[in-house]
Image (cartoon, grey):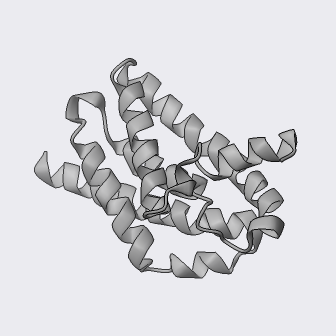
Amino acid sequence: MKRKNLFHVIIASGFGSGFSPFAPGTAGAVLATIIWLVISFFVSYYTLLFLTAALIVIFAILGIWSTNILEPEWGEDPSKVVVDEMVGVWIPLLAVDAEHWYYALVAFALFRLFDIFKPLGIRKMEDFKGGVGVMMDDVLAGIYSLLVLLGLRWVIG
């Protein structure tokens, strides 16, 4: 494998989690949640918010690029590409802080539900071609998860 492609494989596969033989999308989302949890215990709330937003933007851009590079070889929207799940789960994590870390589990669960069932126009995002289509359904699932989590946190107090 060419060195250039190795970079794209690492990014697109979520540091290899996309090669999981069982539920690769869930494996990518679990890895992203673990990465976020580890970071959350070492930084302040505002730093965590900034880092989470940065992860979302950087990995969305890298994910689109890497998916576009690998789709000709791997096929359209391959299951090995899980960077979209990573970005998607980081979006509702914007509503979580280290003090209430258990909301990270709620964020994960909400995201996976929206990602699996694809209601409210999420499936329509897959109509976009290439890396954008791969990424956008998970971004929208993440946004819906964020809104539900913010609502839950507001109701619970």
Residue 150 in view, yes or no: no
Relative height, residue 8 to residue 151 (above, below) = above
- What residue is rendered at 39% in x and 38% in y? 34
Relative height, residue 46 to residue 4 (above, below) = above
- The answer to which of 33 and 8 lies nearer the viewer is 8
Horizontal side of residue 11 vs 71, given as left or right:
left
What quarter of the picture does the C terminus occupy?
A: top left
- What residue is rendered at 48% in x and 62% in y? 21
Count how many numbered circles sit on residues in the image.
Answer: 0
Rendering quarter of residue 73: bottom right
Horizontal side of residue 118 vs 14, given as left or right:
left
Horizontal side of residue 79 vs 1, given as left or right:
left
Indicate the position of residue 7 as horizontal and vertical percent values.
76, 41
Indicate the position of residue 29 as horizontal and vertical percent values.
44, 52
Relative height, residue 81 to residue 91 (above, below) = below
- What residue is rendered at 44% in x and 32% in y? 49
- What residue is rendered at 58% in x and 67% in y? 79
- The answer to which of 80 and 112 lies nearer the viewer is 80
Residue extending farthest left: 156
Indicate the position of residue 3 as horizontal and vertical percent values.
85, 39
